[in-house]
């Protein structure tokens, strides 16, 4: 780890729980809270979606019937957790800083010693420096792990996030803190049912709403846990329940950290007061289910519209809240019957699917296509982005369909950042196309001087675009580092790719990576980076070449060709499926009166509508009949048909991708 990358590490150490998220004004969600002092609860809202790094599948498949208890409310006899006292909060903070401050100081001392040795001409060899840093990482990670295990609460949440960010943290920290993902004991089912009863049924029995409610949780995390249930109408649902008392514990931890950071501001390498203030605000939103429910609606609207606001089929599913069944502490959502992405390899082994088979490749490309298209629409459309795209929040359904869960962490990109991202994507695509042309020309023995000069000009433009995005470098003249960083994040460089400045095509903290010259990232870049790192990580695991910039280019052009548009979740549609407009062509928002182009109660349906519905009905019946005949075939014949269908679909996808690549190349070369 180099000196400049150490600064990045120290910054991420504290910012990691909410890297890349800037909240809306906190006053927008500081509402009143009802309290029940006789039960020892505080009344602050709670919750973060369960599909976090701590999510753990139990394998339970059967539902427990809800027992009737008409004489007593479901919360009777339940002992509610007591909030922390002021003394306990101070003790927790003192414990953290008694461990955290020595770790910070040790890194500062080691940094100063190495810098002094270099100035004196006695600098260590690169291998010796690496050994010294590794020894410090071992000591620091051990001390931090023991401290987090002792304190729990907010600190465990921090450790869980650090354990998943191998792109930012040394392996000693990520590997040792990974054990925190299984640290949370589930709440007793009696407590869970008591919370659900009070929040949704005003203390009544669960049998008034649920046909069954599983005692065993699907997963249990630091802030909440999820249970499967079945509504009275037979719909399976996922019920998220907050841990009583967890909100004040988390916020109190951060509040005390702010206090100590204020007192020690002159000794710390960064202004941690600002960092903790941001974390506090973001957690306030994560702990509010009403906010998450609204965010899920916005994410769904974003992925079902193109950047130009044209309705389009959703590339993936976004589970929604059951109307009327959400409060600040409990949320009943559509149940997703699938496999988390981080457990997909195990599920494939269980089913006997070969990772190199056509079926595996088809599923992988389907997942990549869904995530790529969904994030393109979110980024270049309304700019409202799902901010926590880790494998535990991505489920694979039957037919390789993908679902995106957990809208507790979201980010609204400003219009300027949306345009800056679009420019960045188009420049990366241009650099990639020029590099390909140079390579082909060199292989053919042709002159490449003019092409190389054009590519150098693109590198300069790319570096300026990165700086305008808000990335600051330790050396302002390191334009090649800025350009290489953008290409690594959004392009598809491999080990043979000649990046600007000769940098290695990786984001790991090391001497060959451009990240060593980065002083700070804007939160928007970190947010976009999390999505790109996930998508590219899936592609690498499946050995699929996946150029994000190339696939996002058409969306970027569409975003730049439009002025500011109404958010898709605010558009009002008529019965014909078309958006309603005013007399001057402006789109109507929800709640506005339409211009009269909606069909009235006595108006006859249009011929086109009848034909469309009839065609859909006939197609559905044909699929049903075909599925019946398919099930009657021998298993060997079914497998043969399935393999043929997969091969045809893979060939179709490859032809379509090749066609799009040629179109994009013609556009890029025409522009250049």
Image (cartoon, grey):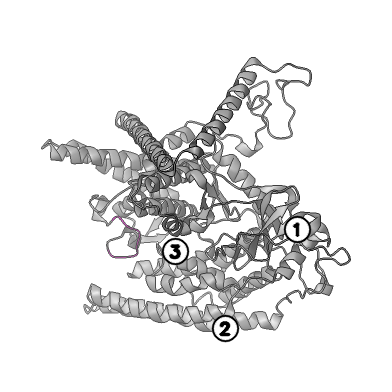
User: Magenta includes 348?
Assistant: no
Residue 5 position (above or below residue 147): above
Residue 236: x, y in percent?
Answer: 67, 51
Residue 398 position (above or below residue 3): above
Badge 3: few (under 14), some or many (20 or more) residues near its Cα, within 10 Å?
some
Asked where in the image residue 82 lies, by quadrant, the reply is bottom right
Q: Secondary structure at mark 1?
A: loop
Name the N-terminal-most of marks 2 and 3: 2
Q: Secondary structure at mark 3?
A: loop
Name the N-terminal-most of marks 2 and 1: 1
Which residue in the protein does label 2 denote?
Answer: 95
Note whether residue 307 is visible: no
Name the N-terminal-most of marks 1 and 3: 1
Q: Quadrant of the C terminus?
A: top left
Q: Residue at x 68, y 33 (%)?
A: 589
Which residue in the protein does label 1 denote?
Answer: 31
Question: As drawn, is 307 to the left or to the right of 69?
Answer: left
Which residue in the protein does label 3 denote?
Answer: 165
Badge 1: few (under 14), some or many (20 or more) residues near its Cα, within 10 Å?
few
């Amino acid at each position: 780890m180099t000196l400049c990358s150490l600064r990045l590490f120290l910054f991420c150490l504290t910012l990691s729980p909410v890297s890349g998220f800037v909240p809306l004004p906190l006053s927008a969600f500081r509402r009143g809270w009802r309290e029940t002092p006789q039960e020892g609860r505080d009344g602050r809202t709670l919750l973060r979606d369960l599909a976090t790094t701590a999510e753990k599948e139990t394998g339970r498949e059967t539902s427990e019937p809800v027992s009737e208890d008409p004489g007593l409310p479901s919360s009777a006899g339940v002992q509610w957790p007591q909030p922390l006292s002021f003394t306990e909060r101070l003790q927790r903070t003192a414990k953290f800083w008694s461990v955290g401050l020595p770790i910070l100081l040790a890194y500062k001392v080691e940094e100063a010693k190495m810098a002094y040795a270099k100035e004196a001409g006695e600098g260590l060899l690169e291998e010796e420096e690496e050994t010294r840093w590794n020894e410090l990482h071992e000591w620091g990670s051990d001390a931090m792990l023991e401290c987090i295990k002792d304190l729990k609460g907010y600190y465990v949440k921090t450790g869980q996030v650090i354990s998943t960010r191998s792109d930012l943290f040394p392996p000693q920290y990520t590997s040792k803190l990974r054990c925190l993902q299984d640290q949370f004991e589930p709440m007793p089912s009696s407590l869970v049912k008591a919370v659900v009863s009070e929040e949704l049924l005003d203390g009544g029995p669960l049998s008034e709403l649920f046909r069954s409610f599983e005692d065993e949780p699907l997963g249990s995390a630091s802030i909440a846990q999820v249970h499967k249930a079945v509504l009275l109408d037979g719909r399976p649902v996922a019920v998220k329940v907050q841990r009583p008392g967890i909100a004040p514990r988390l916020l109190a931890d951060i509040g005390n950290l702010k206090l100590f950071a204020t007192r020690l501001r002159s000794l710390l390498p960064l202004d941690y007061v600002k960092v903790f203030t941001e974390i506090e605000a973001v957690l306030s939103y994560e702990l509010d289910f009403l906010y998450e429910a609204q965010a899920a609606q916005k994410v769904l609207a974003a992925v079902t519209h193109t950047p130009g606001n044209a309705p389009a089929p959703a590339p993936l599913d976004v589970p929604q809240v059951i109307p009327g069944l959400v409060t600040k502490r409990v949320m009943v959502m559509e149940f997703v019957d699938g496999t988390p992405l981080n457990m997909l390899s195990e599920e494939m082994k269980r089913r006997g699917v070969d990772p190199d088979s056509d079926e595996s490749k088809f599923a992988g490309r389907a997942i990549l296509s869904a995530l790529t298209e969904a994030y393109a629409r979110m980024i270049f459309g309304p700019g409202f982005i799902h901010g926590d795209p880790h494998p535990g929040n991505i489920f694979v359904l039957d037919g390789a369909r993908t679902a995106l869960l957990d809208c507790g962490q979201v980010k609204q990109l400003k219009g300027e950042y949306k345009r800056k991202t679009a420019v960045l994507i188009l420049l990366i695509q241009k650099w990639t196309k020029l590099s390909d042309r140079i390579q082909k020309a060199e292989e053919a023995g042709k002159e490449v001087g003019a092409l190389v000069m054009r590519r150098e000009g693109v590198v300069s433009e790319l570096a300026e675009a990165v700086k305008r995005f808000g990335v600051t470098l330790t050396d302002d003249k390191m334009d090649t580092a800025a350009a290489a960083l953008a290409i690594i994040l959004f392009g598809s460089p491999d080990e043979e790719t000649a990046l600007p400045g000769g940098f290695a095509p990786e984001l790991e903290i090391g001497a060959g990576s451009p990240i060593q010259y980065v002083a700070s990232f804007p939160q928007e870049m970190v947010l976009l980076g999390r999505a790109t790192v996930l998508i590219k990580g899936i592609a690498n695991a499946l050995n699929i070449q996946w150029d994000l910039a190339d696939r996002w280019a058409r969306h970027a052009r569409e975003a730049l060709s439009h002025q500011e548009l109404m958010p898709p979740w605010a558009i009002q549609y008529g019965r014909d499926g078309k958006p309603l407009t005013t007399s001057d062509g402006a789109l109507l928002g929800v709640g506005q009166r339409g211009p009269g182009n909606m069909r009235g109660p006595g108006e006859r349906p249009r011929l086109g509508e009848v034909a469309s519905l009839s065609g859909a009905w006939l197609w559905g019946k044909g699929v049903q009949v075909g599925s019946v005949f398919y099930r009657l075939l021998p298993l060997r014949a079914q497998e043969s048909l399935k393999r043929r269908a997969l091969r045809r679909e893979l060939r179709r996808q490859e032809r379509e991708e090749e066609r799009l690549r040629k179109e994009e190349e013609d556009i890029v070369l025409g522009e250049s």
